[in-house]
Image (cartoon, rainbow, N blue to C red):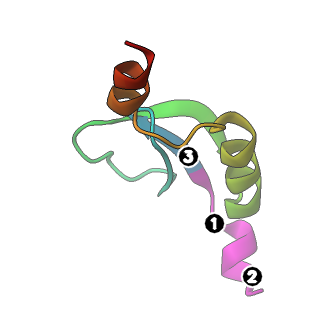
Amino acid sequence: MQDADVDERFMVVVNDEEQYSLWAEGRALPAGWRVDEFTGTRAECLAHIEEVWTDQRPLSVRRGAAA
């Protein structure tokens, strides 16, 4: 692992379909995404996403299945 990978900070972001991703801290978010209030290293953010994103189906699909 390179030092830049350890030092670089990320935010966990989520969209309206409740899909998660990483975004470099300090960069403007793309349209349709919001901060999930978790920041850290790449590894920390990926661990957080693995913990909270337990159903990877988009929200619209989950809602349709529940109807």
- Front-lying residue, 26 or 13: 13
* Residue hosting label 3: 11
Amino acid type at image mark 3: Met
Q: CA distance from mark 2 to mark 3?
A: 18 Å
Task: Give yes or no for residue 28 being in the magenta stretch.
Answer: no
Residue that appears at 63% across and 66% down: 8
Secondary structure state at the residue bearing disc 2:
helix
Q: Residue at x 25, y 37 (%)?
A: 32
State yes or no: discs 2 and 3 in contact (Cβ < 8 Å).
no
Q: What percent of the width, then of the height, locates residue 18? A: 44, 32
How far, Cα to Cα, is label 2 from label 1? 9 Å
SS type, badge 1: loop
Q: Amino acid at mark 1?
A: Glu
Q: Please state which of the two labelled residues, at mark 1 or mark 3, is closer to the viewer.
A: 3
Side of 31 where 56 appears, left or right: right
Circle 3 — which element? strand
* Residue visible at 66% across and 79% down in the picture: 4
Residue 21's spot in the image, x, y percent? Answer: 49, 51
Query: How far apart, in angstroms, are the residues tagged by discs 1 and 3?
Result: 10 Å
Q: Residue at x 47, y 33 (%)?
A: 35
Magenta residues (range): 1-10
Graded by Cα atoms within 10 Å as few (under 14), some (14 to 19) or many (20 or more), the crowding at tag 1 reads few
Residue ID for mark 1: 8
Q: Tag 1 or tag 2, which sits nearer the N-term?
A: 2
**Where does label 2 land, which residue?**
3
* Quadrant holding the N terminus: bottom right
Direction top: furthest residue: 67
Q: Residue furthest bottom?
A: 2
- Residue type at mark 2 is Asp
